[in-house]
């Protein structure tokens, strides 16, 4: 209530929440920052800013329209609530490449986009090495003009880093990375240009010291940087840093983390990056741009950062796959995303245009929905009627999941679908089934 008393109490919704009370509750739970209220008075900010600040800082890399957000996590374990901001993959553009090769790799990063269960997965950042380039300013400006993702600037020379940052400050790159040898110079650059700064240290005590030094110099956005060399030790440090921030509200470690993946074997690089993506790294920095390496990491991120309290669903409606006509097959499945997209992809692979009727099952797959009484023959019939599927085709044949043969008789007895065909039990069998057995 103390937080609520200091809010404007206008319920303007400019913070994205319906009421000022809801916003106050989010602030009290350390899930929102006071600065998210655009109408807060300076007096109120001064009274509550430090006490109400989230235990982990929210850091934004990039400018509006091309921005990656990291941090402001609230829990150690996903089942406690959820993880809020998915880990991002950053791919390195080495200084050893020619300018043309560097631009080509930047274009490859732009194109590293995948679709999985209705979601877009992609590389989030391009990491450009600036030390060792013949003309680092020119290279970074060219890449910044072409890049569709935010930039990380990799270098150790403060002079080079300053000139490059000044040239592309409008795209707000991440400066990577300061250590004990250059913290003063790099912090001055980040502070003067209002850019985020990654800080590397061998241990957490030094991380805390260097982050405090950077903050005292006016750096607001800080990332804690780690190397992957000793995997177990690094995961231990990431865990301790996160626990110190979230459980003890230890401000010097209250920043998101990133890990630079170092591995000679590309298989090892993928496995190690996946481990850190699952265990507290906000960014993993790697070298490879091969799809077979990126996709497993992106899938790990997608799985870990789903909300465990919200079913992963698609809209329950009639979907047209290909360009179906009045003779096309009709089938149904549940609205669990993984189930639906598995069926959809296999129907597409069959090259047989089809109708898929999706039944509302509260995000459960076929067997779980049946076991939980979320799907029945009666519900399937009502869904088919509500979606007016019979108006789309002239036949009355319905393909049902092979796991639900018990529905066959009741659907035939209680609906217009007088020929119910028991389909395959597994989605991978759909192409052969449609190609060999479907006849309207």
Image (tube, helix red, strand yellow):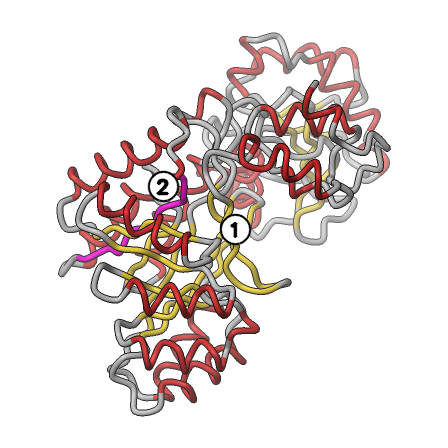
Between label 2 and label 1, give the one nearer the viewer.
2
Residue 113, x across and y down, in percent: 49, 60
Image quarter in which the C terminus is found: top right
128 shown above or below 19: below
Residue at x-position 82% and y-position 29%: 9
Q: In this view, does 439 lie to the left or right of 150?
A: right
Q: Nearer the viewer, residue 267 or 263?
A: 263
* Residue 169, x across and y down, in percent: 52, 74
Tell whether 19 sits left or right of 408.
Answer: right
N-term-proximal mark, 2 vs 1: 1
Q: Residue at x 71, y 30 (%)?
A: 316
Q: How crowded is mark 2: few (under 14 residues within 10 Å), some or many (20 or more)?
A: many
Residue segment shown in magenta: 254-262
Measured in 3D between alpha carbons, the distance from the residue under mark 2 to the one under mark 1, in whole angstroms, is 20 Å
> Which residue corresponds to the image point at 34% horizontal and 53% vertical from the top-left?
213
Q: Which residue does the numbered mark 1 point to in the structure image?
A: 69
| Above or below for 3 versus 437 | above
**Rendered view: 385 above or below 377:** below
Is residue 255 within the magenta segment? Answer: yes
């Amino acid at each position: 209530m103390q937080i609520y008393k200091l809010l404007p109490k206008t319920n303007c919704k400019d913070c994205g929440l319906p009421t000022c009370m809801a916003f106050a509750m989010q602030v009290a739970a350390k899930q929102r920052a006071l600065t998210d209220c655009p109408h807060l008075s300076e007096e109120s900010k001064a009274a509550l800013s430090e006490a109400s600040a989230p235990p982990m800082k929210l850091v934004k890399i990039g400018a509006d329209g091309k921005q990656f957000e990291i941090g402001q996590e609230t829990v150690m374990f996903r089942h406690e609530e959820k993880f809020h901001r998915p880990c991002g993959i950053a791919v390195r553009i080495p200084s050893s490449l020619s300018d043309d090769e560097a631009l080509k790799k930047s274009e490859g990063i732009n194109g590293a986009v995948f679709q999985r269960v209705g979601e877009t997965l992609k590389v989030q950042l391009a990491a450009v090495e600036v030390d060792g380039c013949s003309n680092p300013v020119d290279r970074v400006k060219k890449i910044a003009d072409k890049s569709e993702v935010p930039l990380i600037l990799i270098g150790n020379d403060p002079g080079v880093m300053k000139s490059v940052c000044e040239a592309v400050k409008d795209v707000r790159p991440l400066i990577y990375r300061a250590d004990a040898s250059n913290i003063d110079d790099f912090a001055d650059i980040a502070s003067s240009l209002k850019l985020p700064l990654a800080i590397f240290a061998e241990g957490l005590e030094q991380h805390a010291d260097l982050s405090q030094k950077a903050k005292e110099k006016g750096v607001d956005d800080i990332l804690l940087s780690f190397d992957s060399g000793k995997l177990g030790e690094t995961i231990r440090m990431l865990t301790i840093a996160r626990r110190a921030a979230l459980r003890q509200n230890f401000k010097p470690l209250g920043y998101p983390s990133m890990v630079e993946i170092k591995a000679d074997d590309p298989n090892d690089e993928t496995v190690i990056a996946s481990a850190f993506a699952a265990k507290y790294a906000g960014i993993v920095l790697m070298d490879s741009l091969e799809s077979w390496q990126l996709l497993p990491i992106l899938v790990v991120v997608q799985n870990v950062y789903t909300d465990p309290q919200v079913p992963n669903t698609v809209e329950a409606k009639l979907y047209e796959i290909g360009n179906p006509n009045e003779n096309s097959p009709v089938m149904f499945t549940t609205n669990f995303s993984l189930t639906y997209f598995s069926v959809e992809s296999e129907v597409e692979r069959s090259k047989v245009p089809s109708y898929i009727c999706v039944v509302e099952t509260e995000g459960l797959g076929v067997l779980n929905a049946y076991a939980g009484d979320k799907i029945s023959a009666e519900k399937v019939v009502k869904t088919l009627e509500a979606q007016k599927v019979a108006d789309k085709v002239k036949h009355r044949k319905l393909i049902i999941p092979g796991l639900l043969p018990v529905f066959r008789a009741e659907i035939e007895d209680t609906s217009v679908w007088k020929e119910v065909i028991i389909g395959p039990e597994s989605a991978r069998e759909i192409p052969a089934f449609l190609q060999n057995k479907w006849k309207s």
